[in-house]
Image (cartoon, helix red, strand yellow):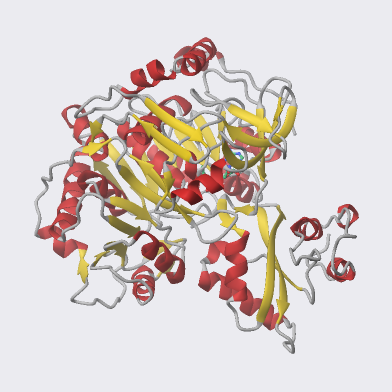
Amino acid sequence: MSEKTYDVPAEWAKRAWIDQAKYKDMYARSISDPNAFWAEQAKRIDWMHAPTKIENVSFAPGNISIKWFEDGVLNVAWNCIDRHLHKRANQTAIIWEGDDPSQSRHITYKELHDEVCRMANILRTRNVKKGDRVTIYLPMIPEAAYAMLACARIGAIHSVVFAGFSPDSLAQRINDCQSKVIITADEGLRGGKKVPLKANVDAALAKADGVDWVVVVKRTGGTVEMNPSRDLWYHDAAKMVTTECPAEHMHAEDPLFILYTSGSTGQPKGVLHTSGGYLVFAAMTHQYVFDYHDGDIYWCTADVGWVTGHSYILYGPLANGATTLMFEGVPNYPDNSRFWNVIDKHKVNIFYTAPTAIRALMQSGDEPVKKTSRASLRLLGSVGEPINPEAWEWYHRVVGDDRCPIVDTWWQTETGGILITPLPGATKLKPGSATQPFFGVVPEIVDADGKVLDGETSGNLCLTRSWPGQMRTVYGDHARFEQTYFSTYKGKYFTGDGCRRDADGYYWITGRVDDVINVSGHRMGTAEVESALVAHEKVSEAAVVGFPHDIKGQGIYAYVTLMAGVEPTEDLRKELVTWVRKEIGPIASPDQIQFAPGLPKTRSGKIMRRILRKIAEDEPGSLGDTSTLADPAVVDDLVKNRQNKK
Ligand code: PRX
């Protein structure tokens, strides 16, 4: 923890949308009269019918129901495109920067309109209707934005699956929401390497039913197999349709998208977000947290496969008429200066990235940063995991030349938008703290029994009130929604995060307290990795925990018990890593695999993960009470054979 603080620079307090006094006043109003506050905020978007009912929410056990602006009618794509055309037709909406530094494009709002309408018409002519699900499995190319906005335009619900996921993960997500159409590309391109997306879709569709059409965007021109009764090239289909497509009238609570995310149990959940509340919240947080002003060039380095890409590459910025940069590549290709070169090339003012990228780049020293100018930069942001104070200080001093405030934004797929964050013109910064709640957000810290803890304290983070960007349900499983988020502490939303509040009322997120691990800012359920491991014929049992990792934040540590008679060899270890990559995707690769003849279990057969975590963290001295184990001797063996000893 760092005790250093950074005051709001005077020029920021003057020019920002929100200064300290305004934050205090607006926050107080957002709590004392949420209906009036959010009715006012709803005016930031265009409605076909303005809402008169604002908040209608129940967190009561057995009756979890979340509705915002429910009688409002709007279209999200219209708000992100058409309403800007009279003023911004020729303004750049999206700057696309390719994996190869020689490739970039500027797409104006008018061009965006035409391309989105084309894509929407392709879907319409394939009989995609309001409420139908469309799975998008695309790299970071403009067509990913067109596809998402095209769905929004015709009222289809998009489910974007990160292009790093395996065919099995893709199939499972297609099946869960019963998509009729998949939009993909021949291949993706990242760091000079090709990713076989169409081939992955073909493999996934061998395991998924009900898909009528696969729309294929040509990205690399690599050879792919086309099934003439199912697959169509986007560029061919686009020639057959017009650039006009009426925007569907959508109710505020009509679904906008599903995004799958990992939890502590079972398969990933389909987090469902709806139209009105989500858009108001994404637009508002984008404007205030990043202090976005007309003409700013804004870059969020996330992938559209994650919620950060949804809310802060696409929906928030475009609703605000911003210029948003979309980057196909990776931070270290062709070299470690790539981010900073892109900032100079496009004169980026606002830069939003993840701590894991900062830590990785920090390792190669200051020189790759310092040889670039970065004079255009005004504000830096961080998201996805706790940022350690050393990385924060480096980001501030080296990347931001001690000039740019850092907004450390805490939120989740489930929250739709940023909930705890500094506002750059209002909030004194403390490196490593996400600082203060955004408007309408009421954090509460509770102990394991649900007792509310006041003042300076630490415990589990809950939110006692709804906000318009909150997820509405788990797609197709409302009982799971209640069970996951509202059953641990009745009457409030439980985030799954641990949190400390300091004497100044600042919040410090300490990481997940459930069986979710955060690897390079990607959420991974330990149960998912375990079920991938036990699907291997030589594995009898597996237990997966997180451990501290210098760059990734957390790494994946797997304890594996082999079938009787199977030899624990180095080759088998490698084979299991490859197996998990194939089953889930590279982001789930175990960093360490320890062969364990036995796992620590209670007499009732429950694995004691607490003990496994301590061993993985290399803290055998703090294993705690092991006397309740069925066989305490297994612990000695595990400690003795720990991988990667300090
Ligand atoms: O543990 C928190 C961590 O990321 C989790 C949410 O992951 P996901 O749904 O994938 O969304 C990531 C992008 C919003 C949270 O439960 N997390 C996110 N931002 C921060 C963070 N932890 C600490 N500080 C943050 N700024």
Foreground of the two, 74 or 317: 74
Q: Is residue 543 above or below residue 388?
A: below
The quadrant the N terminus occupies is top right
Specify the quadrant of the image occupied by residue 227: bottom left
Residue at the farthest bottom position = 565
| In this rendering, position of residue 77 left or right of residue 496 | left
Quick one: quadrant of the C terminus?
bottom right
Ligand 1 shows up in the quarter that is top right
Q: Is residue 431 visible?
A: no
- Residue 196 in sight from this viewpoint: yes
Front residue (pair 267, 341):
267
Residue 179 lies, with reference to residue 383, above or below; the image says below
- Quarter-wise, where is residue 249 in the image? top left
Quarter occupied by residue 447:
top right
Q: Is residue 20 shown above or below 111?
A: above
| Residue 404 image point, x, y percent | 55, 28
In the visual, does 616 lie left or right of 526? right
Seen in the picture, residue 149 relative to 298 is either above or below; the reply is below
> Could you tell me residue 239's position as x and y percent?
11, 59
- Residue 456 is left or right of residue 426, and the answer is right
337 left or right of 638?
A: left
The x and y percentages for residue 592 are 70, 67
The tally of labels here is 0
**Image location (x, y in percent) of residue 515:** 65, 54
Give the residue at x 50% y 51%: 480
Q: Hey, which residue is sitting farthest front in the picture?
A: 62
